């Protein structure tokens, strides 16, 4: 049997006979059932803009792009009351599972945590308030996720995260055993070739990125060794800045990539078992309530603790 890779997008030029047709009908003719599915999931882009209304008419010569999930499968996420760790009039704290996106992707607006939360609240309360992610977690990072449900909380939350007033601690399993009990690491951070995230020397913080698109920013993490075994260890990480993939990049730079983090050099299996995710979990979150000022703290142990 020959396995053919699944393309991540299909591109069409709208032919004259489809001019004026709604996007969903044009997609159905050009890509049959697949086109209808992609439009329904929010993965249709017309002349560079996401289609938000399936009845939008198309023009002859317009470029229709149907973006598909990288693995060919859509995420189906449903939340239940047990996934809620905290809720008041302004905030919600969720237990985010691994292998789910927190917000819309270019190929899907339905299979993410924020959309699932909106569906949950609509079913529970009959309406869903405007939801806003206070921060983000990678698809395969599990743990505590803070969401605002009232506009009054948004600006104070943004200020608190931007000014280091939120304590965020993570637990990870790494390949290899650190030679240190504690470690503090400061580097530059930004995109490199092909848009991938990478570290830069600390002296380059503030300089323009070589590939353009901004400047090198500071990435600052503290680490503490919690437990060690023959070929791996459990490490607690405290974020002082919140850069994309910060912990993963810093651990890899120390020669201790996370188990399952194949992007940054981690092993894809351990003790004979395939790893479906990188072993990183958001364990602790502490901050002052953005509206009342009350001190808030949550702790959610990692599955491997």
Image (tube, grey):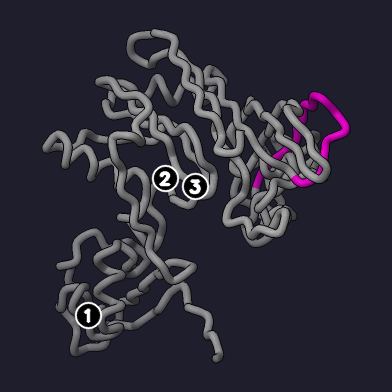
> Is the stretch drawn in magenta largely helix, strand or loop?
strand
Asked whether, in this view, residue 286 is left or right of residue 202, the answer is left
Q: Which of the pair 22/208 is nearer the observer?
A: 22
Quadrant of the snapshot with the N terminus? bottom right
Residue extent of the magenta highlight: 175-190
Tell me the residue that label 2 is attached to: 102
Estimate how packed mark 1 is, as few (under 14), some (14 to 19) or many (20 or more) residues with alpha carbons within 10 Å. many
Q: Secondary structure at mark 1?
A: helix
Real-space CA distance between mark 1 and mark 2, rounded to the nearest whole angstrom: 30 Å
Tell me the residue that label 3 is attached to: 98
| Number of numbered discs | 3
Pointer 1 with pointer 3, Cβ within 8 A: no
Instruction: Choose the circle earlier in sequence order: 1 or 2.
Output: 1
At 41% from the left and 70% from the top, the residue drawn is 68
Please give the label number shown on residue 26.
1
Q: Secondary structure at mark 3?
A: loop
Estimate how packed mark 3 is, as few (under 14), some (14 to 19) or many (20 or more) residues with alpha carbons within 10 Å. some
């Amino acid at each position: 049997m020959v396995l053919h890779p699944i393309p991540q997008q299909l591109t069409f030029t709208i032919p004259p006979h489809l001019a004026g047709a709604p996007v969903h009908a044009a997609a159905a003719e050009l890509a049959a059932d697949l086109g209808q599915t992609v439009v329904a999931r929010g993965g249709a882009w017309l002349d560079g803009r996401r289609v938000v209304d399936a009845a939008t008419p198309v023009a002859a010569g317009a470029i229709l792009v149907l973006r598909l999930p990288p693995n060919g499968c859509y995420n189906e996420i449903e939340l239940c009351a047990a996934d809620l760790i905290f809720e008041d009039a302004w905030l919600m704290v969720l237990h985010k599972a691994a292998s789910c996106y927190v917000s819309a992707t270019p190929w899907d607006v339905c299979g993410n945590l924020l959309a699932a939360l909106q569906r949950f609240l609509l079913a529970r309360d009959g309406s869903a308030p405007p939801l806003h992610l206070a921060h983000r977690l990678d698809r395969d990072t599990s743990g505590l996720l803070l969401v605002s449900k009232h506009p009054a909380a948004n600006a104070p939350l943004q200020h608190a995260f931007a000014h280091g007033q939120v304590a965020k601690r993570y637990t990870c399993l790494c390949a290899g055993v650190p030679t240190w009990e504690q470690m503090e690491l400061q580097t530059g951070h930004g995109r490199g070739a092909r848009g991938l995230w990478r570290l830069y020397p600390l002296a380059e913080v503030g300089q323009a990125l070589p590939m353009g698109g901004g400047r090198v920013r500071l990435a600052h993490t503290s680490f503490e060794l919690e437990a060690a075994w023959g070929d791996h260890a459990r490490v607690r990480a405290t974020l002082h800045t919140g850069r994309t993939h910060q912990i993963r990049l810093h651990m890899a730079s120390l020669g201790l990539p996370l188990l399952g983090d194949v992007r940054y050099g981690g092993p894809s299996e351990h003790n004979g078992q395939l790893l479906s995710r990188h072993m990183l979990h958001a364990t602790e979150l502490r901050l002052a309530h953005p509206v009342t000022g009350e001190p808030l703290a949550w702790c959610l142990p990692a599955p491997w603790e």
